[in-house]
């Protein structure tokens, strides 16, 4: 959520930032509502002072036996109470309208976020590895997975709906191996592992900004709960309404969870295979940091995600998302894109974002640093995929395929898989 004080004092800068984000913003409406809110508060304070004075007068008049004048004073208090009720209603309405603006407006981009209109303006930062050149006709993961009996999209549809899939034999083991490998890798680098619910309440999803704006992207249960779209939701809210100690920051958490997304608006995109589906596994990274360390921790988080790809020896590139492409809650984001031969292109496999204090304001997550300032400040939250398991599986199948239709298991996964090659199941 945006800081109302900052918005109030920097209207031109906010308007320019929203323009760069391709986001709707009405400075005049915000100012009018904010002024109406403050005017109502001022009126309430004036009326309360007037009522207090009248109430005191009633007591004095009663002591003096001036009952008629006391009754007049009581009538005056009644009128004041009606005015107070009206002023309070105006304040509540203005408060709600201002809060809606702040809750549905995206985060302000960090000054180092590139300015651009769309994904076409995202600059490439670096590349690692060289895409493989095949001396045979390479297959896409959806065909190779079906041929080997490790990916079954048809049965996934039969069991659930389109954009679901099933894994069999060594396909299921590869999924499990990737999850364990990723979790082990991150915990070895200082992340504390959590096991969290796959269902969240509305307050939790509001804290990380999925609600209220993106409800259509979520799967909702009959009792008003939601299937989580990412473990970021749960890991970030572990410290909702808490005050952390600066000495403990940064906190580094990771968790495996199933993730559920309705993929609203994704019709016709990546319809084949396991790239864009309704349910997938992911190992997520989340950090809580001090303001002055926020951007440094983002760079380190990107390195942690890159480390997984490097260990798997999968070619990838890192891009910086421009202002027109960063997510709603992010102030700065790097995407990692893995090479997929079936697309003859790089496809997103991880997104690492610094949300600044945007989520912490919504979830009321603060920290105390008595050596450097009085009181408390909002913590900075960061999140990143470490990695999306299904997309990693697709990248392994396509990049490690052999001419005989088998798949070589990446060396770092062999202790988890118990085999060197995936053959027909």
Image (cartoon, rainbow, N blue to C red):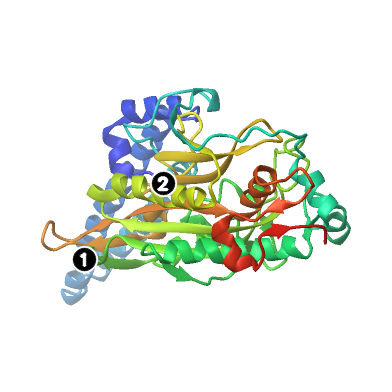
Please state which of the two labelled residues, at mark 2 or mark 1, is closer to the viewer: 2
Q: Secondary structure at mark 2?
A: helix
- Answer with the quarter of the image where residue 168 lies: bottom right
Q: CA distance from mark 2 to mark 1?
A: 23 Å
Question: Which of 76 and 266 lies nearest the eye of the viewer?
Answer: 266
The x and y percentages for residue 113 are 38, 32
Disc 2 target residue? 302
Q: Is residue 219 left or right of residue 24?
A: right
Q: How many marks?
A: 2
Image position of 234 with respect to 326: above or below? below
Which residue is depicted at the point 17% across and 76% down? Answer: 63
Specify the quadrant that holds the C terminus: bottom right
Q: Is residue 371 left or right of residue 88?
A: left
Q: Residue furthest left?
A: 371
The x and y percentages for residue 193 are 45, 69
Question: Which of 253 and 105 lies nearest the eye of the viewer?
Answer: 253
The x and y percentages for residue 108 are 38, 36
User: Dot 2 surroundings within 10 Å: few (below 14), some, or many (20 or more)?
Assistant: many
The x and y percentages for residue 224 are 65, 64
Which residue is depicted at the point 22% across and 57% down? Answer: 49
User: Dot 1 surroundings within 10 Å: few (below 14), some, or many (20 or more)?
Assistant: few
Residue 257 visible in the picture = no
Q: Which comes sooner in the sequence, label 2 or label 1?
A: 1
- Answer with the quarter of the image where residue 34 lies: top left
Residue 9 visible in the picture = yes
Question: Which of 224 and 366 lies nearest the eye of the viewer?
Answer: 366
Q: Is residue 73 left or right of residue 410?
A: left
**Which mark, by number, is residue 314?**
none
């Amino acid at each position: 959520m945006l800081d109302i004080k900052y918005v109030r004092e920097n209207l031109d800068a906010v308007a320019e930032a929203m323009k760069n984000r391709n986001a709707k913003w009405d400075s005049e409406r915000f100012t009018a509502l904010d002024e109406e809110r403050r005017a109502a508060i001022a009126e309430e304070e004036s009326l309360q002072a007037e009522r207090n004075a009248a109430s005191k007068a009633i007591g004095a008049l009663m002591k003096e036996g001036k009952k008629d004048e006391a009754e007049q004073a009581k009538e005056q208090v009644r009128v004041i109470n009606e005015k107070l009720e009206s002023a309070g209603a105006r304040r509540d309405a203005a408060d709600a309208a201002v809060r809606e603006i702040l809750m549905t407006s995206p985060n302000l981009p960090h000054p180092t976020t590139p300015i651009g209109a769309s994904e076409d303006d995202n600059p490439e930062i670096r590349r690692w590895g060289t895409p493989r050149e095949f001396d045979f006709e390479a297959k896409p993961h959806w065909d190779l997975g079906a041929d080997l009996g490790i990916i079954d999209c048809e049965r996934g549809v039969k069991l659930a709906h389109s954009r679901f899939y099933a894994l069999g034999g060594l396909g299921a083991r590869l999924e499990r191996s990737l999850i364990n490998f990723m979790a082990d890798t991150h915990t070895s680098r200082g992340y504390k592992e959590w096991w969290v619910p796959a269902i969240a309440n509305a307050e939790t999803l509001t804290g990380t900004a999925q609600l209220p704006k993106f409800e259509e992207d979520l799967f909702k249960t009959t009792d008003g709960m939601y299937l989580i779209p990412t473990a970021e939701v749960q890991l970030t809210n572990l410290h909702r309404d808490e005050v952390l100690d600066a000495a403990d920051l940064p906190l580094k958490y990771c968790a495996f969870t199933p993730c559920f997304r309705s993929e609203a608006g994704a019709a016709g995109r990546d319809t084949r295979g396991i790239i864009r589906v309704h349910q997938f596994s992911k190992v997520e990274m989340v950090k809580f940091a001090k303001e002055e360390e926020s951007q440094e921790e983002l760079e380190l988080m990107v390195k942690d995600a890159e480390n997984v790809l490097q260990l798997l020896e999968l070619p990838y590139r890192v891009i910086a998302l421009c202002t027109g492409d960063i997510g709603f809650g992010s102030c700065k984001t790097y995407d990692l894109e893995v090479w997929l031969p079936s697309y003859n292109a790089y496809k997103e496999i991880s997104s690492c974002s610094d949300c600044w204090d945007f989520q912490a304001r919504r979830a009321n997550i603060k920290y105390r640093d008595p050596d450097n300032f009085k009181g408390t400040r909002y913590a900075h939250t960061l999140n990143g995929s470490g990695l999306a398991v299904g997309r990693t599986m697709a990248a392994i199948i396509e990049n490690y395929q052999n001419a005989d239709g088998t798949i070589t298991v990446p060396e770092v996964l062999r202790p988890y898989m118990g085999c060197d090659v995936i053959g027909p199941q």
